Image (cartoon, helix red, strand yellow):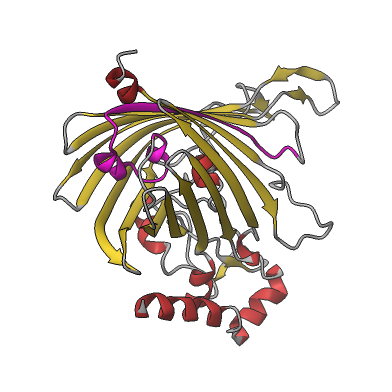
Amino acid sequence: MRFISIFVLIILANQFAYTQNQLEIDDLTGGLNTITTAVPFLMITPDSRSGSMGDVGAATSPDASSISTNPAKYSFIEDDLGFSISYVPWLRALVPDINLSYISGYKKLNQNDAVAFELRYFSLGDITFTDILGNTLGQFNPNELALGGSYSRKLSDLFSLSLATRYIYSNLTGGQMAGDIQTNAGKSFAADVAGYFTNKIRFLKKDSDLSFGFNISNIGNKISYTNVGERDFIPINLKLGSSLNINFDDYNSMSYSFDINKLLVPTPPLYNSENEIIAGKDPNVSVVSGIFQSFSDAPDGFSEELREINLSFGTEYWYAKQFALRGGYFYEHDTKGGRKFFTFGAGVKYNVFALDFSYLINASRTINGTNPLANTMRFTMIFDIGALQQEGI
């Protein structure tokens, strides 16, 4: 608790600690210095449970969609076999036909080992290509997908590790020419390394579960959409989290979860009029160098590194393990994108089937009072095949 208090104080102090160097950078950039990567769809939370709890998931209890947040949790899942299907209408305030579809599933091999899979498909709707004269060249549906699998194993009764791999395919142009340059689909292979610790404790004289988790996701090669252009980092991300679940009695339980996220890719430096770096570091480095550099390359130093940390808070209430209510909050600093939103959701579970729903409410300050993420909904169906087999269906 002392460590958490110190960490929170550092974060709060950071909001007011503006040095002269920061003022100079603000004069040139307006204070904005967002980190951009290729294939950002990999950072969209696909399932309704995490989506209704502020996007937490590193240390929450395992479920069929855990491969998207922390695949190491599968070693502690109670059921032997299951899968989930999720659907997310995305950015509906801007475009009506962007959506994310997600399928994931798992199989317990024994008490210690589990395997899982995922398929993530992101459709960006229909676009019309034209030449410089406005003549129509054709229509295309840009799309991206990621296909992956994971293996997790308990190393003790309290701790598990997992390794996941992922193939990423991003087709945004359909092979159209950009001037004299031929475009192509971007492709990458990536890996996740995750860990999960959980222990039963007594808290407020109640049986409780205290959990911690981490997931370093999307460690993979850069992506390029041409044969001559620069290659872009994919969203390599560090997720750390904790969760406390309190069982008040046989019917009522409550969990409280907290996650932090930080992109492990270079921060854009500050350039002068001659395109020379005057603050920060050169972002054109290898993947490994970029991961380590990401902790110390912000133009405004350590205070800006802290602003690159996103915070998520979530809570979940279960009644009789059949009905759930959830809520959460997500925070991103204004200079790094400014996403701030509250999330709410509910879930019902009956034998082998469960249905979850989530809803997002904008909490960020914007010029016109709107946010493309506002009113985002997620829908998830979960099937417990293990329970199906036990009932002999």
| Residue 39 makes an appearance in the image | no
175 part of magenta stretch: no
Residue 135, located in which quarter of the rendered image?
top right
Pick out the residue farthest to the left: 156
Picture coordinates of residue 273, whole percent (x, y): 68, 66
Where residue 269 appears, as percent x and y from the top left, is 55, 65
On screen, residue 159 above or below 388: below
* Figure quadrant of residue 201: bottom left
Report how many numbered discs are placed on residues in the image: 0
Q: Quadrant of the N terminus?
A: bottom left
Write the start and end of the magenta stretch as one range.
64-92
Q: Residue at x 26, y 29 (%)?
A: 80
Q: Nearer the viewer, residue 109 or 366?
A: 109
Residue drawn 60% across the image and 37% down it: 378
Between 22 and 269, the one nearer to me in the picture: 22
Q: Is residue 47 left or right of residue 371?
A: left
Residue 206 lies, in percent from the top left, at 32, 63
Whether residue 283 is visible here, answered yes or no, is: yes
User: Which quarter of the rendered picture does the C terminus lie within?
Assistant: top left
Instruction: Kindly identify the residue that appears in the image at 41 percent across and 45 percent down.
Output: 69
Answer left or right for 135 relative to 363: right
Magenta stretch holds residue 69: yes
Extreme-bottom residue of the structure: 20
- Between residues 191 and 200, which one lies in front from this camera angle? 200
Question: In the current view of this chain or complex, which residue is farthest to the top?
Answer: 393
User: In the image, residue 294 lies at what x, y percent?
Assistant: 43, 62
Q: Is residue 163 left or right of residue 393?
A: left
Residue drawn where x is 46% and y is 47% of the image? 318
